[in-house]
Image (cartoon, rainbow, N blue to C red):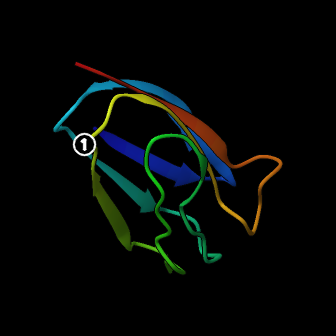
Amino acid sequence: MKISYRDFAIDPDTVKVKVGSTIEWTNEDEAPANVTSEGGPMKFASGSMSEGRSFRLRVSRTGVIHYECTLEPVTMNGTIEVVR
């Protein structure tokens, strides 16, 4: 599953994937961004990603994961539903 950070928004911002899937976020904005979990079955933080950089995560547990870019949390936040 590929997720883009573009124009200070996330596309798509809500996804449903199966356990074992890999999610890849790519920053397509000139400004730095990050991917940081807000809660749920998995905790993660990408660190700063400059334009063109990506972060990959293999999901290993079912549940709902909320995440955000801590630099633009109002417009850049999303949800991942992980199912069996």
In front here: 21 or 53? 21
Q: Residue pushed farthest right?
A: 74
Instruction: Give coordinates of residue 44: x percent, y percent.
Output: 46, 62
Which residue sits at x=38%, y=74%?
53
Residue on which disc 1 sits: 60
The quadrant in which the C terminus is found is top left
Horizontal side of 42 relative to 84 (left or right) equals right
Q: In which quarter of the image is the N terminus?
A: top left
- The answer to whether 83 is drawn above or below residue 37 in the figure is above
Residue at the image position 41 percent from the left and 44 percent from the top: 3
List x then y, in percent, for residue 50.
50, 80
Q: Where is residue 46 in the image (x, y as percent from the top left)?
A: 46, 71
- Is residue 45 shown above or below 64? below
Placement of 27 over or under 52, stated as above or below? above
Task: Identify the residue shown where x is 16% and y is 38%.
Answer: 20
Q: Which amino acid does label 1 sit on?
A: Ser
Quarter of the image where one finds residue 40: top right
* Pick the front one: 45 or 11: 45
